[in-house]
Image: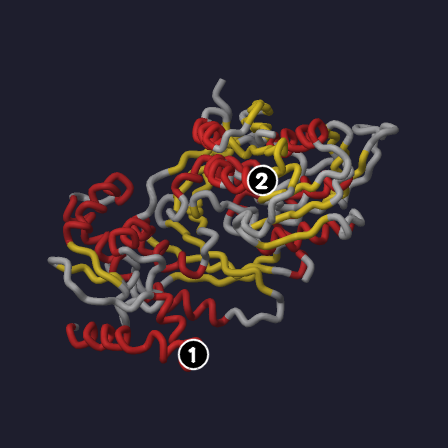
Amino acid sequence: MAKKVMTVIKLQVPAGKATPAPPVGPALGQHGLNIMDFCKTFNARTAQQMGDIIPVEITVYQDRSFDFICKSPPASSLLKKAAGLETASGQAGRMFVGEVTWDDVRDIAETKMQDLNARDLDAASRIIAGTARSMGIKVVQQATDTEYVAPEDTVAETEGAAAAQPVAGGTEGEAEVEEEAGE
Amino acid sequence: MSQAERAWVRVAVQCPLEAEDAVTGALLPLSPNGLSTLGTGPITVSAWVGPMRPEDDTSGVEQRAREALEEIPDYLLPRPIDMKVTLVPETDWIEAFRAHHRPVRIGRIVVKPSWEEWPNPALPARSDDILLELDPGLAFGTGLHPTTRICLNALQDRMRRGDRVVDFGCGSGILAIAAALLGAREVLAIDADPSAVRVAEANVRNNGLEDVVTTHVGDSLTVAEPGWNIVIANINPVVVAQIAEDVARILEPGGTYICTGIPINREARVLEALREERFDGITPRISGDWIGFICTTPG
């Protein structure tokens, strides 16, 4: 007694933190689904993965019922973990906020191979490396000792220069200069 | 600021499927609640920034999105970048959300959405009904979810007049308000989400209970001194297990912990935590695919 599928909704939602705000509300609301039901069930299922972004595919049936499956976190999220970052740069290109090795990149490419639509592992790795650079994460042959400026500090410096500088200024300033000189 | 006035900026980027992860990585910092993706190739990835008021300037959002996307190599994301920015009013999906809410009776409590008529032929009034008027906005707790039913029934079974009650993860405030309507002397409603607490405050006022219920934005029970009779938490298995230790600390001897938000078959770690904290008389309550527990501190 298979139910008739109306559509499939794809979302990426922080584990354990779905709310009826966007993107969940509009995506489910337009198909008349019970938004709260989804949020509550998603949050309960993903509570143990707090901190990850979870891609979720929601199958909507014609009677407005739905099923959903959770997938492995996107490459961007795995890269942040590999680089030990809380958030991505927001200023990618002009400033690197961390690094990963080509080995990390290949590991992530292997994990994501099925989802990437790439011919082989080399092609998949190039895609992952492109994602890394777009996030301000440098791809290096071997791990270096570079001290990267954390994205939070970058914000603090631009927003409240006077207050933040005397405490946090010195070492971070040097790290930034070192990084630029190395480019 | 009423819900109807608020809007979200939707930044929709069309890209090849291979670029999904890169575009996701670029847009997520703008859109911490997550992203939506349409299509199978090419796809449209949408970030949602907000909520905003009509007078807010949205050009900064567009610029930040464009700057983040420009960093993606052009072999992944072809130029020019196909990006559309639109303002979507919240009313669009609040209406859809409201369509699922009807007045509902749970024990003696009738939860009535503020926009619905009651009594009505589908749900006639009874003499001992306790009316709980609620506008959940976009917060959790509408009375329809099985876990809310578990909590409302448990409160009616276990609460005595004059009890002091903590509602941890209060969402719309439905459980805190129910406790106050059932005769609690004092109720503390806590939620980590400031917008949920605003919704709860409005609902407390609409039920005329601001003298009984106080609200607090926070993600722990450390704000509460010992001396409570009931702690109720409808969140998820991880959180209700994590807070068991604090619950045991702030409850009076013989006080009651009511916890749910637990899908059936995911209760093991909750039970473990309850036993570790020496809760007595652990009683399961099941509704639909969900389970909750009622238990008491030794006393």
Tell me residue B195's x, y (percent): 60, 55
- Residue in view at x 61 percent, y 65 percent: B53
Tell me residue B59's x, y (percent): 49, 71
Closest to the observer, B263 or A123: B263
Closest to the observer, B16 or B171: B171
Q: Are marks 2 and 1 in contact (CB under 8 Å)?
A: no
- Residue in view at x 62 percent, y 67 percent: B54
Q: Chain of mark 2?
A: A
Is residue B38 depicted above or below B284 in this figure? below
Closest to the observer, A88 or B264: B264
Q: Is residue A79 visible?
A: yes
Quadrant of the image for the C terminus of chain B? Answer: top right
Quadrant of the image for the N terminus of chain B? Answer: bottom right
Residue furthest to the top in view is A1
Residue furthest to the left in view is A141
Q: Chain of mark 1?
A: A
Mark 2 and mark 1 lie on one chain; the one further toward the N terminus is 2
Dot 1: few (<14), some (14–19), or many (≥20) neighbours within 10 Å?
A: few
Q: Is residue B18 visible?
A: no
Dot 2: few (<14), some (14–19), or many (≥20) neighbours within 10 Å?
A: many
Q: Callout 2, which amino acid?
A: Met
- For the rendered model, the colour scheme is secondary structure
Residue A163's mark? 1
Is residue B235 depicted above or below B46 in this figure? above
Tell me residue B120's x, y (percent): 83, 32
Say whether residue A33 is left or right of residue B11. right
Say whether residue B17 is left or right of residue B292. left
Provide the residue designation for mark 2. Answer: A36
Residues at discs 2 and 1 both on one chain: yes
Q: Callout 1, which amino acid?
A: Ala
Residue A95's mark? none
Say whether residue B46 is left or right of residue B141. left
